[in-house]
Image (spheres, rainbow, N blue to C red):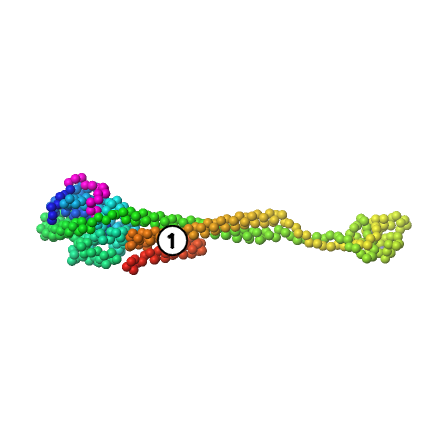
């Protein structure tokens, strides 16, 4: 190994954007060996040996010796991700500065949200470092099949690494040697990793307590063999990293912005859909109320009633009748045969009496003097009169008024709903646009993954919708979002 000068200055935690620093971002699944690799690198750069181990990042069996600031969680629980945040580990060798960035492991037991959060942290630190020399994908090389965890990790990586950095991808297979590795590089398709960027290491010295091997000649030999091999591999790795050069990392920033833009647009869709449900329910309620109002209107619409009214009418006659002024409805003598020529006393309607002045009518008992002759007679007739039932009319008016108010509200609400639906559609298209923009930077960006959480929330929301019509509309809407984006997920290699 070449002359190495371990940096004795106080370790730098934040990278001060030094242009000539080779920044190496270590990413990978939880437990794949990122922090261990950094400890091996520490020994490489600072002249550590198996008898004098230099530990940058503490683990269960090895306390830190180098004074780096680090953030390791729960060192005792093997299922939990150890590294909690991104930390720079700076070293210098032959006047060349390196910064290795340890990152939290992906596909941790803490779940998808945690992964998304960690990916964002990784992208942030990558952007912050200004330039990147290598993105080191650390994978446990003994994993025979591509586990779903590893698949998820690879998929997350593909969605996060901008195309400009694809030739700076380095894969380190841990826990193995070139001959014992099981990892299928095809799992990274369409990413291809050239042979020079593939490294195999078995960094087993730190996985068991020093006491368990330091005095056991056989174990020590085995560990030493791996150790020496790892140091040679690191030597090779550093040469290769300087070959890869610096790539500006601002694409990470752009990606982050676009991703968070998409995220907030997706959240807006969730909220707008919820708004839609509220409005649609309101509309349904209003339509129900309108039904009731219209039933009221029709049931009170008979406030006009026709009643037959009897009345007397005078009908002219061709003959003479004897009528009484006191009894206008009577005809005391119909078609009086004495005509108008003889005095009334000849009319049969009257009783004969001694004195003419007290002759009375047989029919109405009025005096003869109350009678007169006329060429008309009273006739009883009936006519139908429209009567307004006031109370019913009032109810009718009220229902009518209510119906009009409801109809007005329905029309306003329908307008709002229409706008909201259109807005949702436009926004969905905008999301697709943003995704396309993102794919310009990162062709492997998977919108399906990005969308999965949103779709899950939307589907849960739909589950609470009881109105079948509203539900059908919502389901169709969700399907449309999914199909809109389906075209986006056709990767250049044709896979999805
Ligand atoms: N045998 C062997 N064990 C290893 C190797 N690399 C890592 N380990 C062990 O695997 C376990 C996990 O390693 P870490 O370096 O903490 O893994 P990590 O990738 O930093 O994990 P997170 O911080 O949770 O993301 C530790 O017990 C290591 O000692 C290796 O190459 N060979
Ligand atoms: Mg770690
Ligand atoms: Zn008469
Ligand atoms: Zn009379
Ligand atoms: Zn009379």
- Magenta part of the chain: 8-24
Q: Residues within 10 Å of mark 1 (few under 14, many from 20)?
A: some
282 relative position to 61: left or right: right
Residue shown at the point (55%, 53%) measured from the top left: 295
Residue identifier under label 1: 429
Q: Is residue 21 magenta?
A: yes
**What percent of the width, then of the height, locates residue 355?**
90, 49
Residue that lies at the very extreme toward the bottom in this rendered image = 494
Task: Answer whether residue 330 is visible to the viewer in this image.
Answer: yes
Residue shown at the point (82%, 53%) measured from the top left: 374
Residue shown at the point (83%, 48%) measured from the top left: 370
Q: Is mark 1 within 8 Å of ligand 1?
A: no
**What percent of the width, then of the height, locates residue 200?**
17, 54
Residue that lies at the very extreme toward the right in this rendered image = 354
Residue 484 vs residue 104, the one in the foreground: 484
> Which picture quadrant has residue 338?
bottom right
Q: Is residue 493 magenta?
A: no
Residue 11 vs residue 432, the one in the foreground: 432
Which quadrant, please, contains the C terminus?
Answer: bottom left
Residue shown at the point (66%, 53%) measured from the top left: 306
**What percent of the width, then of the height, locates residue 106?**
26, 50
Residue 384 vs residue 162, the one in the foreground: 162
363 relative position to 108: left or right: right
Residue that lies at the very extreme toward the left in this rendered image = 217
């Amino acid at each position: 190994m070449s002359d190495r000068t371990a940096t004795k200055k106080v370790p730098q935690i934040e990278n001060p954007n030094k242009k000539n620093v080779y920044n190496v971002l270590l990413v990978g699944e939880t437990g794949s060996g990122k922090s261990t690799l950094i400890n091996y690198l520490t020994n490489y750069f600072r002249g550590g040996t198996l008898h004098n181990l230099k530990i940058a990042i503490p683990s269960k069996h090895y306390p830190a010796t180098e004074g780096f600031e680090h953030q390791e969680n729960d060192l005792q629980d093997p299922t939990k991700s150890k590294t909690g945040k991104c930390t720079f580990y700076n070293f210098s060798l032959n006047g060349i500065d390196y910064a290795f960035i340890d990152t939290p492991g992906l596909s941790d037991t803490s779940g998808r949200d945690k992964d998304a959060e960690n990916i964002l942290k990784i992208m942030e630190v990558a952007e912050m470092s200004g330039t990147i020399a290598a993105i080191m994908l650390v994978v446990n090389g003994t994993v025979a099949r591509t586990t779903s965890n590893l698949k998820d990790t690879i998929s997350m990586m593909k969605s996060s690494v901008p195309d400009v950095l694809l030739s700076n991808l380095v894969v380190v297979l841990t826990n193995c040697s070139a001959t014992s590795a099981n990892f299928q590089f095809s799992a990274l398709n369409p990413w291809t990793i050239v042979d020079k960027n593939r490294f195999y290491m078995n960094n087993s010295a730190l996985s068991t307590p020093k006491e368990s091997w330091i005095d056991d000649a056989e174990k020590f030999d085995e560990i030493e063999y791996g150790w020496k091999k790892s140091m040679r591999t690191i030597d090779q790795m550093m040469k290769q990293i300087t070959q890869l050069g610096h790539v500006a990392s601002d694409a990470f920033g752009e990606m982050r912005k676009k991703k968070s833009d998409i995220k907030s647009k997706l959240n807006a869709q969730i909220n707008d859909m919820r708004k839609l449900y509220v409005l649609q329910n309101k509309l349904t309620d209003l339509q129900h109320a309108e039904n009731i109002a219209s039933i009221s209107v029709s049931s009170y619409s008979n406030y006009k009633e026709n009643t037959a009214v009897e009345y007397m009418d005078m009908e002219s006659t061709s003959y003479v009748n004897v009528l009484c002024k006191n009894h206008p409805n009577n005809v005391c003598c119909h078609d009086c045969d004495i005509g108008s020529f003889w005095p009334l006393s000849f009319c049969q309607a009257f009783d004969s009496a001694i004195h003419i002045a007290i002759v009375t009518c047989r029919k109405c008992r009025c005096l003869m003097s109350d009678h007169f002759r006329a060429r008309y007679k009273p006739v009883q007739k009936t006519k139908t009169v429209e009567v307004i039932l006031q109370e019913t009319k009032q109810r009718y008016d009220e229902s009518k008024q209510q119906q009009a108010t409801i109809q007005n509200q329905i029309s306003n609400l329908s307008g709002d709903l229409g706008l909201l639906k259109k807005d949702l559609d436009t926004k969905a298209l905008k999301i697709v646009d943003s995704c396309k923009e993102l794919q310009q930077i990162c062709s492997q960006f998977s919108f399906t993954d990005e969308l999965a959480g949103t779709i899950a929330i939307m589907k849960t929301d739909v589950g609470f919708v009881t109105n079948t019509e509203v539900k059908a509309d919502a389901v169709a809407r969700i399907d449309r979002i999914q199909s809109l984006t389906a075209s986006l997920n056709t990767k250049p290699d044709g896979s999805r």
